[in-house]
């Protein structure tokens, strides 16, 4: 079960990373829309698992690899935004959130 502190930090990470992807990396990864769907923080607040939805014509795995390569810079930008709210900036672990693809697949199967 997630503590109150963990859930607050998760919401902060989700909000700030969404703004970072919208403003700073809008054209960096190509013509794609990157949405932060969930953020989960470990109990010791050292690692944050970030779930991303990637929309567009580009290959999702290639975009995810580019995001992982830039994770240190993304963490730095997040740290500048959250420096007054957090003592330690967690490391980010990015993964693709495939729940929307799963829902879409179920809907197409139900229509048939």
Image (spheres, rainbow, N blue to C red):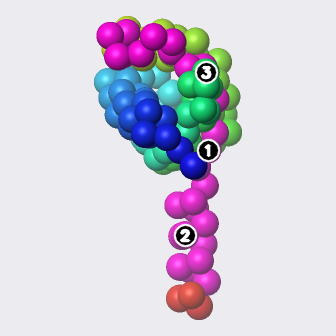
Q: Check disc 2 and report its element: helix, strand or loop.
A: helix
Earlier-in-chain disc, 1 versus 3: 3
The numbered disc on residue 103 is: 2
Q: Is residue 31 visible?
A: no
Marks 1 and 3, how far apart in space? 20 Å
Q: CA distance from mark 1 to mark 2?
A: 15 Å
Q: Residue at x 32, y 24 (%)?
A: 23
Q: Is residue 90 left or right of residue 80?
A: right
Is residue 88 found inside the magenta-colored segment of the image?
A: yes
Task: Please tell me whether mark 1 or mark 3 is closer to you in this view.
Answer: 3
Q: Secondary structure at mark 3?
A: loop
> For mark 3, what is the residue?
46
Magenta residue span: 82-109
Q: Position of residue 51 (x, y in %)?
A: 56, 42
Foreground residue among 86 and 107: 86
Identify the residue at image location x=54%, y=70%.
Answer: 104
Mark 1: give few (<14), some (14-19) or many (20+) Cα within 10 Å. some
Q: Are marks 3 and 2 in contact (CB under 8 Å)?
A: no
Position of residue 13 in the picture relative to residue 62 (left or right): left
Q: Which of the two residues, 84 or 60, is positioned nearer the viewer here?
A: 84
Whether residue 75 is visible to the viewer of this picture, yes or no, is: yes
Q: Residue at x 41, y 15 (%)?
A: 86
Q: Quadrant of residue 69?
A: top right
For label 1, the residue is 96
Lateral position of residue 29 relative to residue 84, left or right = right
Q: Who's the residue at 35% across and 16% down the image?
A: 85
The answer to if 103 sits in the magenta stretch is yes
Give the vertical position of 6 relative to 25 (above or below).
Answer: below
The image quadrant of residue 96 is top right
In the picture shown, does residue 4 fall above or below 97? above
The mark that comes first in sequence, 1 or 2, is: 1
Residue 109 position in % (x across, y down): 61, 83
């Amino acid at each position: 079960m997630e503590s109150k502190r963990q859930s607050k930090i998760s919401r902060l990470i989700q909000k700030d990373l969404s703004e970072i992807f919208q403003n700073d990396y809008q054209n960096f990864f190509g013509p794609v829309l990157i949405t932060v769907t969930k953020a989960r923080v470990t109990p010791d607040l050292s690692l944050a698992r970030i779930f991303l939805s990637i929309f567009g014509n580009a290959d999702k795995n290639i975009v995810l690899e580019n995001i992982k390569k830039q994770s240190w810079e993304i963490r730095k930008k997040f740290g500048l935004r959250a420096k007054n709210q957090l003592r330690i900036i967690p490391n980010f672990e990015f993964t693709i959130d495939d729940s929307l693809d799963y829902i879409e697949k179920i809907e197409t199967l139900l229509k048939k």
